[in-house]
Amino acid sequence: VYKKIKAEKDEAQAIIAMTYMTDRTAGTIPLDETLALFAADISLRHKLAMADAIIYATTLQQKALLVTSDHHFEGLEHVLVLD
């Protein structure tokens, strides 16, 4: 993230992004049955590959913002797609 933002914006923006991400409590979120079924529904609804659907379902479940450069997520709520 730092490299991409610094290359496309500037170092100050890159540091802000990294600070934002590292200040959050990181942890492992288990892929339980509920999340897996939610991801499957998302995969069907948005025509996402299952791995992308799991990422997006986790984002929604956690009420988070997904920051990505993967354009498969373009147009979805709670997603910031970097060019």
Image (tube, grey):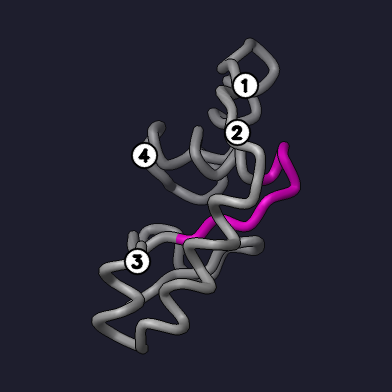
Q: Which mark is residue 41?
A: 2
- Residue under pointer 1: 37
User: Which mark is first along the chain, 3 or 4?
Assistant: 3
How far apart marks 1 and 3 lie (CA) works out to 33 Å
Q: Residue at x 38, y 33 (%)?
A: 51
Up-down relation of residue 65 to residue 4 (above or below): above
Q: Which of marks 2 and 3 is in front?
A: 3
Binning the other alpha carbons within 10 Å of mark 3 as few (below 14), some (14 to 19) or many (20 upward) gives some
How far apart marks 4 and 3 lie (CA) works out to 26 Å
Position in image of residue 36 (x %, y %): 58, 20
Q: Which amino acid does label 3 sit on?
A: Tyr
Q: Residue 49 carries which label?
A: 4
On-image quarter of the C terminus: bottom left
User: Which mark is first along the chain, 4 or 1?
Assistant: 1
Q: Is mark 3 on a helix, strand or loop?
A: helix
**Contact flag, marks 2 and 1 (Cβ < 8 Å):** yes
How far apart marks 2 and 3 lie (CA) works out to 32 Å
**Contact flag, marks 1 and 3 (Cβ < 8 Å):** no
Q: Which amino acid does label 4 sit on?
A: Ala
Q: Nearer the viewer, mark 1 or mark 3?
A: 3
- Place residue 32 in its image quadrant: top right
Q: What element carries label 4?
A: loop
Left/right placement of residue 1 relative to residue 63 reads: left
Q: Which portion, as a residue range, is magenta?
A: 60-67
Position in image of residue 66 (x %, y %): 55, 55
- Place residue 56 in its image quadrant: top right
Position in image of residue 71 (x %, y %): 35, 65
Left/right placement of residue 36 relative to residue 13 reads: right
- Is 66 contained in the magenta span? yes
User: Which mark is first along the chain, 3 or 1?
Assistant: 3
How far apart marks 2 and 1 lie (CA) works out to 6 Å
**Contact flag, marks 4 and 3 (Cβ < 8 Å):** no
